[in-house]
Amino acid sequence: MVYESVPRTVRILLLGEPGVGKTSLILSLVTEEFTEHVPPKAEEITIPADVTPEQVPTNIIDICLAEQTLEQVGEEIERAHVICIVFSVDRQETLNKIASYWLPFVRENCPDDYRKPVILVGNKIDLIDYSIIDNIWDIAEEYPEVDRCIECSAKSLINVSEMFYNAQKAVLHPINPIYNIEEQE
Ligand code: GTP
């Protein structure tokens, strides 16, 4: 079995369909306010250890498919410790793409015997008045690397810091070591 040792920094990568709010989530976390007009891709951000709940320096990486090739995104997956796949709760197709595209793509870019923890992030809950979390259990069952699901809003600043904190925790305090059990002898 291969154990990933606990890293001294945490590298969090945000993936997901265009327009789901990846850049907005990062900027809302950093500035503690919502800006309508954000750049297509946030610069890589380093949060110093002393302002993170777990006291571990944390890098946050955005992607933008309009500016990057899939090969470059794959390289970012290889470098990440945890992946947040963001969808927009008011656009069902962005949730559908998680199981049909993003989770398989993440697996393709992880070593065979180790699956990186994934957090599923339903953004823009300010736009709906019901929870969509029930639609996600099937995905979590099929993909055990899904550590947890969280609903948030970059606009209303709901659960934004919690989302990044949960991503940190998934790396530093994994509930279960994540293996590709089917491929173990
Ligand atoms: P790409 O750069 O195309 O990959 O998009 P992205 O996922 O980085 O999305 P971005 O942050 O650019 O946000 C897309 C749009 O959604 C913008 O108009 C944002 O203002 C809006 N948006 C982002 N988060 C929220 C949210 O929580 N609530 C609402 N209502 N709008 C949001």
Image (cartoon, rainbow, N blue to C red):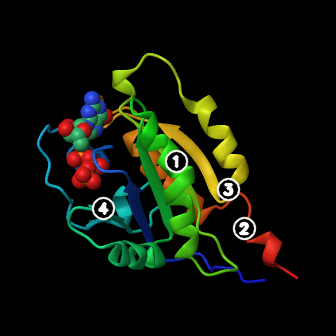
Picture coordinates of residue 59 (x, y %)? 35, 67
Q: Please name which of the two marks, 2 or 4, marks the residue nearer to the observer.
A: 4
Q: Which residue is mark 2?
A: 177
Picture coordinates of residue 4 (x, y %)? 64, 79
Q: Please name which of the two marks, 1 or 3, marks the residue nearer to the observer.
A: 3
- Categorize mark 2 by other alpha carbons within 10 Å: few (<14), some (14-19), many (20+): some
The amino acid sitting under disc 3 is Tyr
The amino acid sitting under disc 1 is Leu
Report the quarter where the C terminus lies: bottom right
Instruction: Tell me, yes or no, if residue 26 can be seen here.
Output: no
Q: Secondary structure at mark 2?
A: loop
Q: Which residue is mark 1?
A: 120
Side of 33 where 151 appears, left or right: right
Side of 39 where 10 appears, left or right: right
Q: Earlier in the sequence, mark 4 or mark 1?
A: 4
Q: Earlier in the sequence, mark 1 or mark 3?
A: 1
Q: Please name which of the two marks, 3 or 4, marks the residue nearer to the observer.
A: 3
- Categorize mark 1 by other alpha carbons within 10 Å: few (<14), some (14-19), many (20+): many
Task: Report, in whole angstroms, how far the alpha carbon at label 4 lies from the one at label 1.
Answer: 15 Å
Q: Secondary structure at mark 3?
A: loop
Q: How many marks?
A: 4
Q: Earlier in the sequence, mark 3 or mark 4?
A: 4
Q: Which residue is mark 4?
A: 62
Q: Compare residues 90 and 13 and report the one nearer the observer.
A: 90
Task: Report, in whole angstroms, how far the alpha carbon at label 1 lies from the one at label 2.
Answer: 18 Å
Picture coordinates of residue 139 (x, y %)? 64, 46
Q: Which residue is mark 3?
A: 143
The amino acid sitting under disc 2 is Pro
Q: Is the residue indicated by label 4 positioned so its CB lies within 8 Å of ligand 1? A: yes
